Amino acid sequence: MIKSFLVLNLILMGMIVGITLHYWQSPKKENIEALQNITELTHQSKLSLSVAYDESLYNPTYPDMPNLKKMDFVYE
């Protein structure tokens, strides 16, 4: 029982160390630029942490739904 617990604990610790090292060593700016280039190529909305003002004339996801002015839906 204790041997299996120690083995699982070592695997978990190894995974945590691996994830932490990967996070510290990954090129964040290059990854962000690559994702932005992909969104430009696929004509999707750009990635952001906030909701941007929608100036489009129609809603591509739901064409029958009228366009929301400014950020009405977010703040209601």
Image: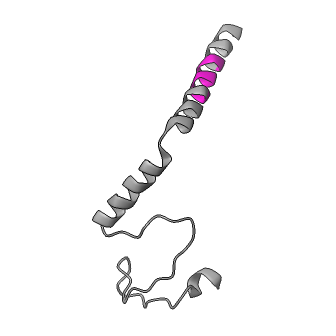
Q: Residue at x 52, y 77 (%)?
A: 52
Q: Would residue 28 be found to the left or right of residue 38 on screen?
A: right
Tally the numbered discs.
Answer: 0
Q: Residue at x 35, y 84 (%)?
A: 63
Magenta residues (range): 9-16
Q: Residue furthest right?
A: 2
Which colour assignment does the render follow? Answer: one colour
Q: Main secondary structure of the magenta part?
A: helix
User: Could you tell me residue 21's position as x and y percent?
Assistant: 56, 31
Q: Depth check: 45 or 27 in front?
A: 27
User: Could you tell me residue 39's position as x and y percent?
Assistant: 35, 63
Q: Would residue 34 be found to the left or right of residue 48 on screen?
A: left
Q: Would residue 72 be found to the left or right of residue 2 on screen?
A: left
User: Could you tell me residue 67's position as x and y percent?
Assistant: 44, 89
Choose top left, top right, bottom left or bottom right for residue 65: bottom left
Q: Would residue 15 be found to the left or right of residue 33 on screen?
A: right
